[in-house]
Image: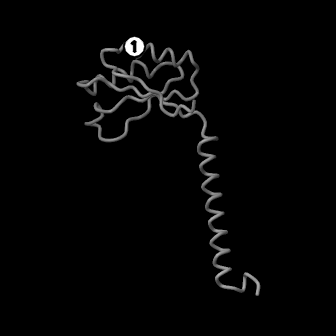
Amino acid sequence: MTWWRDSKGRTRALLTAFGLVALFGMLVAGFSNELFAGDQRQLVVSLRPGVTQADRETVKAGCGSLSGIGVVADRGAADRQYRLPVRFDISGTTTAQEAALESCLYGYRELVRGVITQGDAA
């Protein structure tokens, strides 16, 4: 008797085929999201305790207007934004532009607590 006429063999073959197709789909999606996504770096600036929303806006306005630097829009409740870090989009920037942003942030050292780069593959 051939495997396609046997219900147990047919079920096993269909489940194996479905599993392989699902695994292939997950791998393709994972590789394409990571390898072909491009530069998605952000510079996350955490602020010192006690800063206000006006202080956040000062940092965003002062350093977000630099060449090649973009400010990532805030998400969430507007009355709680002062608790969140300021994010700058540095995807596609040169080393000189990143250095200019960090030196600009150094000018606000009384407000800035720390800086970290997110989305850096290296």
- Where 121 sits versus 115, above or below? below
Depicted 65 relative to depicted 11: above or below:
above
Residue at x 76%, y 87% (from the top left corner): 1
Outermost front residue: 1
Q: Residue at x 36, y 30 (%)?
A: 85
Left or right placement of residue 49 versus residue 94 in this view: left
Question: Where is residue 39 drawn, in percent x and y?
Answer: 58, 33
Report the number of numbered marks: 1
What is the quadrant of residue 52 in the picture?
top left
Q: Residue at x 61, y 36 (%)?
A: 38
**x then y, percent, for residue 19:** 62, 65
In-front residue for pair 48/51: 48
Q: Secondary structure at mark 1?
A: helix
Q: Quadrant of residue 20?
A: bottom right
Visual colour scheme = one colour
Task: Locate residue 3, reporting x and y percent.
Answer: 73, 81
* Residue displayed at 28% across by 30% down: 82
The front one of 13 and 95 is 13
Question: Left of 117 or right of it: where is 45?
Answer: left
Q: Residues within 10 Å of mark 1 (few under 14, many from 20)?
A: few
**Quadrant of the image containing the C terminus:** top right
Query: Residue 77: image x %, image y %?
Result: 29, 41
Quarter of image, res 83: top left
- Is residue 97 left or right of 6 when viewed as pictured? left
User: Mark 1 belongs to which amino acid?
Assistant: Tyr
Disc 1 target residue: 106
